[in-house]
Amino acid sequence: MKIALLGYGKMGKEIEKLALSRHHEIFLKIDNEVEWRNNLEKLSESDVAIDFSMPGCVTDNIKRCFQKNVPIVVGTTAWFEELDEINKLCVQTDQAMIYASNFSIGVNIIFEINRKLARIMNGQNEYELTIDETHHIHKIDAPSGTAIKLANDAIDILDRKNAWSGTASLDTGMINITSNREGNITGTHLIKYESDIDSLEIKHEAKNRQGFALGAVLAAEWIVGKSGFFEMKDMLGF
């Protein structure tokens, strides 16, 4: 495939290495507006785009891909308030997009386990749910997009929870998310149900960025030839 990389930071470089190892071509690298002006017309020659850019430019990047009929894989986070609008635009214009707050296969397995566990715990009101996430000191958003998805998925299922908080809250209807920024940690997420008599934990720890890159490239391979708005669970069959 001819891949257009939108955003060429650490993740973009990791995706480039992984894509080349799977015999794909990095057809374009676009990391700023000057490069967009120089390459916009060439974008339509790409088979697929992968976006790990910045929250402030991701929706423009998506719309440019839609205009050029290029399917897009989006891993950029911290733009959730615009996601519904982009979802509708994708469907209305018969384009193709797959979005995930985290493209790691392991994390998406954790997403599924989190949902199933929430169904089991829905009637167990003696357990309090908290989420803890730890990332490197350069991560911009806090809580992480992965932690927010874990919380929102649980909120959809748990009758006793209606929102999440990124700061400590005594409101029993809240899921408290603790965010830690330390060193060069790639990403660790801990889901914890605790009562007065015991506790239950599910943990995912990323050893490096390769898992995120592999998931994004697999998503790019999967979405070519499709139309619609997708999530990783669609690709993985959850």
Image: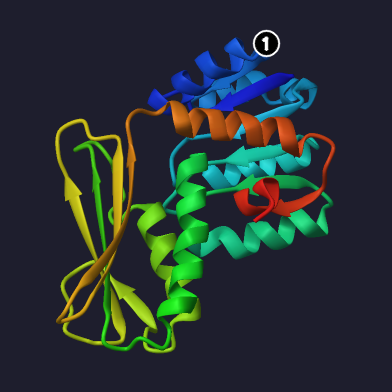
Which residue is drawn at the image coordinates 66% and 31% (left, top)?
A: 49
Residue 18 vertical placement versus 118 (above, below): above
Which residue is more in the foreground, 125 or 189? 125
Quadrant hosting residue 3: top right
Residue 120 position within the rendered picture, expressed as x and y whole percent measured from the top left: 46, 77
Which residue is more in the foreground, 163 or 112? 112
Quadrant hosting residue 208: top left
Is residue 139 found left or right of 227 in the rendered image? left
Which residue is drawn at the image coordinates 73% and 57% (left, top)?
A: 89
Quadrant hosting residue 29: top right
How many numbered circles are shown? 1
Is residue 190 found left or right of 103 in the rendered image? left
Residue 138 position within the rendered picture, expressed as x and y whole percent measured from the top left: 24, 36
The image quadrant where one finds the N terminus is top right
Is residue 124 found left or right of 198 in the rendered image? right
Please rate how many residues cluster around mark 1, counting C-alpha atoms within 10 Å: few if below 14, some from 14 to 19, many from 20: few
Give the residue pinned by disc 1. Answer: 23
Residue 97 position within the rendered picture, expressed as x and y whole percent measured from the top left: 69, 46
Residue 103 can be seen in this image: no
Q: How is the image coloured?
A: rainbow
Which residue is drawn at the image coordinates 45% and 21% (left, top)?
A: 14
The image quadrant where one finds the C terminus is bottom right
Residue 165 can be seen in this image: yes
Residue 52 position within the rendered picture, expressed as x and y whole percent measured from the top left: 49, 35
Residue 21 vertical placement versus 134 (above, below): above
The kind of residue on which mark 1 rests is: His
Farthest residue to the front: give it: 197
Residue 33 vertical placement versus 159 (above, below): above
Label 1 secondary element: loop
Which residue is more in the foreground, 113 or 95? 113
